Image (tube, rainbow, N blue to C red):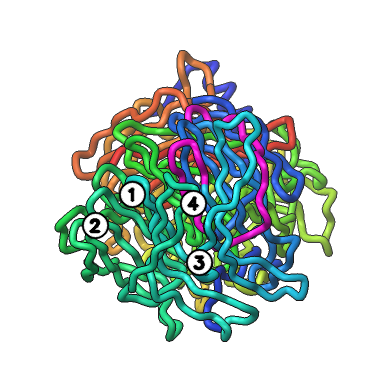
Amino acid sequence: MTITHPVVRARAYLLSLCALLGCGSTPTEEPTDGVATTGSETSAIVAASGEAARVVRADRFHALMPTAVTSFGAAIVGDRLYTAGGYHGEPHNYTPAGQSGEVWSVSLSDGNDWRAHPGIDPVQGEALVAHGTALCVIGGMRVRPDRTLVSVADVRCLDIAADSPSWVARAPLPAPRSTHDAWVIGHTVYVVGGWALDGDSSSGVFATTMATLDLTDPAAQWIETEAPFRRRAIAAAGNDAWLAVIGGLTEAGQVSSEVDVYDLSTHTWRTGPALSEDGFGIAATRSGDTVVASARRGTLWELNAGATAWTDHGSLAFPRFFHRLVSHGDQVLALGGMRGMMAGARVRHVEVVNPVTEPSFTVIDLPNGGAARNRQGVFLIDGTLHLFGGNNSLGQHDFLPENFESAHHVLAIDGLSWTDAAVYPFPRQTISTVISPDGESGIAMGGFGHDGPEENTAGAAHTHPEGFRYLFEDDRWEPRPGLPVSRSQFGLVEHEGTLFVFGGLDYDPSRSGDAAPSSAGDEAFRHLTEVLTGPADGSAPFTVVATPMPEARRAFGGALIDGTYYLVGGMHGEFELVEGCRGVELATMTWREIACPAYTRLNPQLVAIGERLYLVGGTSVRDGEFLAEPSIEVYDPRTNTWSTLIETMPLEPRHLRAFEHRGRLVLFSTHDEQPLAHLAILTLPR
């Protein structure tokens, strides 16, 4: 069944040219940093690079730290979240300039007013606790001019309610201590774990005691009692009855999952349930009577009184360690840290990690890292977004050679920082991409553009058959078997080591002859129904599958769940929208019809998350007009039904890209007259 409305037919042809391949030592405090080369609006936050990123919508609290740091302190007083100290320089290459003495706070009601407070001596690996209206910084370590590290015993408190707040010294710790943690129960602060460092790591002496201090008495001194563990880079949190000390690194340099629990009524220690992952650089807080912790995998773990095991309570959108967790009412927030042992930017996001019962959007605007405005090739892997190629114009038919890009830019979505990477071998747009099964490379196929640099670039743009593999670790593109026939706007999917190619368009204007554009005799447009398969490792060329597609389809949404590839929307050979929807079982190439969404879309994004498919963006026909489709629809393959998740997205739907990221829907677009990029994170009900 096709749409025959005359306005639709005219617009379909005009849109087809746009859609035509698209217009437009032992481990120390931190891991290595850096990306390899080979509802309310917050104020702009200026990153270290001088570029600004801002949250323009947050359905629940979300903020961006002024400077992303690791190994810092965080605490809440009243309705404000405070941070102090930390390290923002190059890890393992410590310098005094990379260490922070800044103290910041942000309102927890809207996250739009970061304020600077009286600073402290630069320090990292410290603890920050709150008591009444006071903040107290306890211990930590400093970088000396010779770039060695020394732990300190300093304790200083700031009464933020004072007319002229200033830091006041309290009794120093019995011995220097860093990479410890502290927790306040009643009026007493408990300091556990850590070590005393005086130079290189071989000088580190692990703490053997728990130190406590009465915060109500300015003259009070620390009291030490023996602790049954020797660990650093730990986390501590508890309730009125017990204190849990979680994870860390042992004297032998082993990452620990151990948990020790201190009973306040008996003043004794016992062994608690071990964490289900290693706990190096872990963070913890209290939520009600529950202790909540997260380590570098990003899983949120909960421990209840008397429980024999930790329970999985969801995940962070941005995995991190050497971060902090804090609680405010029934909300738990994660802030700071960095994503893990792989290269990557520190995390700037302050995110609420509690599950949601309704879809929750955060939208962030940031500078565009490149010139392309749409139709880039993309890879999203480990929270890093690669964008390459694309079209630098917003016009529908701007296909001159200078409109096509080959630049390759990489966005760390956790740190909101851009880096440049190896350029794509040719200026192309509308390249189909997929990640290799081993996750070590990205595969890019086909696309639309002019001939190569050694050939004539003045002719009309056309589709291309090339295939390339991008090696993430090496920052390098290398050729791989391409397509037997040039095509663009096709579906590319990997399943069990095999690549599958569905649909698309082979476009070459030199084949038009005297035929009118889009007419039945116009050989420039060849809509392809052959299905191709080939090994993902590129060890053999593509071959044609015996069973073709039931109908031609290009510029459609495609996604894979449980061995079935689903095709929704798109356009066919007569420049009409394809209203039927399909699923194909890849093992047998068995096709079946499935239910279709409320609106047939051109150039939509279809994303698999869990057991459902999410249909986002593109254009649809409403009242005879092609319009950007603002809704998000959800398909459940088990019931063969669609439902509307959101009627109107907070982003321009046209030309956006959609991805799954840690159970969330991430949307990204550079389609803007301004040199801006738009990042949206949709947290789904659990």
Q: CA distance from mark 1 to mark 3?
A: 20 Å
Residue in the image at 75% along x and 60% along y: 97
Q: CA distance from mark 4 to mark 2?
A: 23 Å
Can residue 227 be spotted in the picture?
yes
In front of the other: label 2 or label 3?
2
Residue in the image at 38% along x and 58% along y: 190
Q: Dot 3: what SS?
A: loop
- According to the picture, the residue beneath numbered tag 4 turns out to be 219
Whether residue 115 is situated above or below residue 93 in the rendered picture: above
Residue in the image at 34% along x and 64% along y: 245
Side of 453 relative to 611 (left or right): right
Q: Position of residue 7 (x, y in %)?
A: 55, 16
Q: Residues within 10 Å of mark 1 (few under 14, many from 20)?
A: some
- According to the picture, the residue beneath numbered tag 3 turns out to be 179
Q: Residues within 10 Å of mark 4 (few under 14, many from 20)?
A: few
Q: Amino acid at mark 2?
A: Leu
In front of the other: label 4 or label 2?
4
Q: Dot 4: what SS?
A: loop
- According to the picture, the residue beneath numbered tag 1 turns out to be 185
Q: Which residues are magenta?
A: 108-135
